[in-house]
Amino acid sequence: MVPPQDGFIPAHGGYRKLRSYQKSQIVFDATVLFCARFLEKRDRTIDQMVQAARSGKQNIVEASQASGTSKEMEIKLTNVARASLAELEEDYQDFLRTRRLLEWPPEHAYSRRLRALNRAPNATYATFKKGIESSDSEIAANVIRGLVRVSCYLLDRQPATLEHAFLAEGGLRERMTRARLRKRSGRDTRN
């Protein structure tokens, strides 16, 4: 994270602390492994799934970096991340459907277990490793799909948080104007 500065550009870049980033990183790593294990090497779906997973993760990074100077860009990139992960979820659903595998309903015992694991503080890839690396493609696809859904849920909540921050702090131009007015009035002792 870029440290706070004396001035009008707020701290930004702390994406590694975001739960949405942490979950999307697990999703990316799991998707790369899943595609290598369960899809034919020449299947174009591999590139689509890996790129959707990567886009979800990387747009969170880019949004976090842009947040210092543009709340609008941060919100747009957060929404791009969300859209990419929605596409990825559809790919996992397609995988299950076309192979006539069960898509776990919310009341399924494994779905309940996955929800419990997702609530664990500081969950990492290792927390979900057994399901992600299962030799049963139905289990692996459902576990990763569940992680995608959690990532999407977290990303759905971020724009509201960003909107609140914007309303409280204003945008870059407003902060620049306030800093300049402070400087002119002599209340700002910085050089």
Image: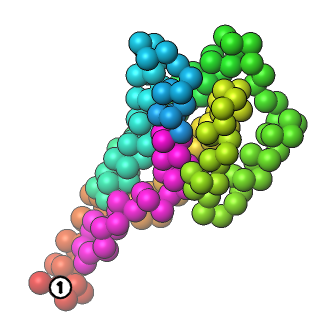
Taking the image as shown, residue 71 lies to the left or right of residue 81, namely: left
Q: Give the magenta part as a residue range.
A: 1-29
Determine the residue positioned at 79% across, 30% down: 104
Quarter of image, res 1? bottom left
How many residues crowd mark 1 within 10 Å: few (<14), some (14–19), many (20+)? Answer: few
Residue 147 part of the magenta-drawn span: no
Determine the residue positioned at 64% across, 54% down: 127
Quarter of the C terminus within the rendering: bottom left
In the image, farthest residue toward the front: 135
Task: Reply above or below: 180 against 126.
Answer: below
What percent of the width, then of the height, locates residue 90? 60, 22
Task: Reply above or below: 157 against 148.
Answer: below
What percent of the width, then of the height, locates residue 126? 59, 54
Taking the image as shown, residue 48 lies to the left or right of residue 11, namely: right
Determine the residue positioned at 22% across, 84% down: 188
What percent of the width, then of the height, locates residue 99? 69, 13
Taking the image as shown, residue 133 lies to the left or right of residue 47, namely: right
The kind of secondary structure element at disc 1 is loop
Total marks shown come to 1
Task: Reply above or below: 180 against 97.
Answer: below
Along the viewing direction, whichever of 126 and 145 lies nearer the viewer: 126
Residue 24 part of the magenta-drawn span: yes
What percent of the width, then of the height, locates residue 57? 44, 43
